[in-house]
């Protein structure tokens, strides 16, 4: 009898966490955000082994780039302020790195940036046919690199950049939006007009910090981007505003640290979420911890899958 009872428990269906979007299958909604750990193949592999449903690489440009001098990152306690300056090995070298990840059991999203549409054409062509990459995320929103930060603020440029990339790449295009604009829905619409398949909301919030002992900005680059829990309510608001107006998958990004944070983004309308600062602070064990919390929440409330809670806040 006891055995039979245990058998019944085993058969109880677990709430489903998988996400199907852009023709891709993510085994759960937790995706590594661009910029954190995404620069080498072994680390991307470890992120997936730790439970991530997918990974976004560090932003890669056509040419290698050194980034800014130190200090480039400061931990403010309530979030990180970074001004890395988009350091990366360049597309050609990085593509060789990704080639070793063919067997990875999670979609790889390549984050890219370009200083001109001509560069975008070259990147799009180089990446096409490379089936280790499932999608590209176009970073038009780094808030502290001249030539990039301006794109996200101008709907005409956004549409044009996205249209150009779409014409030259054979993969879904996700556009990463900036919160540093007066109307994020207008920018999201421009991206959709250009042919974006999905959006990520949000990149970091432009910010600065001053060392009062010496009376100088802390970051060598003066301005940086704030990430972490401090920006979560801004990110949730952006996801909500976009999904209230537009029917397009949105990856929520900004300060996700717990299962409840993931649920909040999903209820705001996010298709899945991206995690960055929380990994820098809490390590890779955070994926399994959040997944456990997510399952418990769904079970306790009687939901069968994360699809049941997606966009719930819009139906209030
Ligand atoms: C960086 O590498 O400079 C950060 C990337 C970003 O803020 O988009």
Image (cartoon, grey):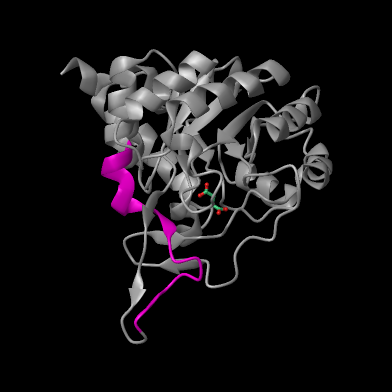
Q: Quadrant of residue 266?
A: top left
Q: Is residue 95 left or right of residue 153?
A: right
Q: Residue at x 50, y 46 (%)?
A: 142
Residue 270 locus on image (x, y percent): 38, 26
* Rendered image quadrant of residue 271: top left
Q: Residue, x 30% and y 16% (percent of image)?
A: 245
Residue 302 appears in the figure: yes
Query: In this orientation, which residue lies closer to the viewer: 219 or 246?
Result: 219
Residue 75 horizontal side relative to residue 35, left or right:
left
Where residue 186 appears, x then y in whole percent?
35, 23
* 228 falls in the magenta region: yes
Numbered range of the magenta stretch: 215-235
Between 4 and 170, the residue placed more toward the observer is: 170
Does any portion of residue 13 appear in the rendered image?
A: no
Q: Nearer the viewer, residue 61 or 79?
A: 61
- Give me the residue at 39% from left, 44% from top: 254
Q: Check the image and name the residue furthest to the bottom.
A: 213
């Amino acid at each position: 009898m006891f055995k039979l009872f245990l058998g019944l428990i085993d058969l109880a269906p677990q709430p489903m966490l998988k996400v199907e979007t852009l023709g891709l299958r993510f085994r759960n909604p937790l995706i590594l955000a661009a910029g954190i750990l995404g620069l080498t193949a072994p680390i991307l592999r470890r992120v997936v082994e730790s439970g991530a449903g997918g990974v976004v690489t560090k932003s890669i440009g056509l040419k290698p780039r050194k980034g800014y001098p130190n200090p480039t990152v400061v931990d403010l306690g309530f979030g990180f302020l970074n001004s890395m300056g988009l350091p990366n090995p360049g597309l050609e070298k990085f593509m060789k790195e990704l080639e070793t990840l063919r067997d990875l059991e999670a979609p790889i999203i390549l984050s890219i940036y370009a200083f001109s549409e001509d560069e975008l054409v070259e990147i799009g062509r180089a990446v096409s046919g490379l089936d280790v990459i499932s999608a590209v995320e176009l970073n038009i929103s780094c808030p502290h690199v001249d030539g990039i930060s301006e794109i996200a603020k101008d709907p005409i440029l956004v549409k044009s950049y996205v249209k150009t990339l779409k014409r030259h790449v054979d993969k879904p295009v996700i556009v990463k939006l900036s919160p540093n604009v007066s109307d994020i829905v207008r920018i999201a619409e421009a991206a959709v007009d250009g042919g974006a398949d999905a959006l990520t909301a949000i990149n970091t919030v432009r910010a600065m910090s001053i060392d009062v002992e010496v009376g100088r900005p802390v970051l060598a680059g003066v301005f940086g981007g704030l990430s972490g829990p401090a920006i979560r309510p801004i990110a949730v608001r952006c996801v909500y505003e976009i999904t209230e107006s537009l029917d397009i998958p949105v990856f929520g990004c900004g300060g996700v640290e717990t299962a409840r944070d993931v649920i909040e983004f999903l209820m705001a309308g996010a298709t899945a979420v991206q995690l960055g600062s929380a990994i820098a602070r809490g390590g890779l064990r955070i994926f399994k911890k959040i997944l456990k919390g997510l399952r418990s929440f769904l079970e306790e409330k009687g939901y069968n899958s994360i699809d049941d809670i997606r966009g719930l806040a819009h139906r209030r």
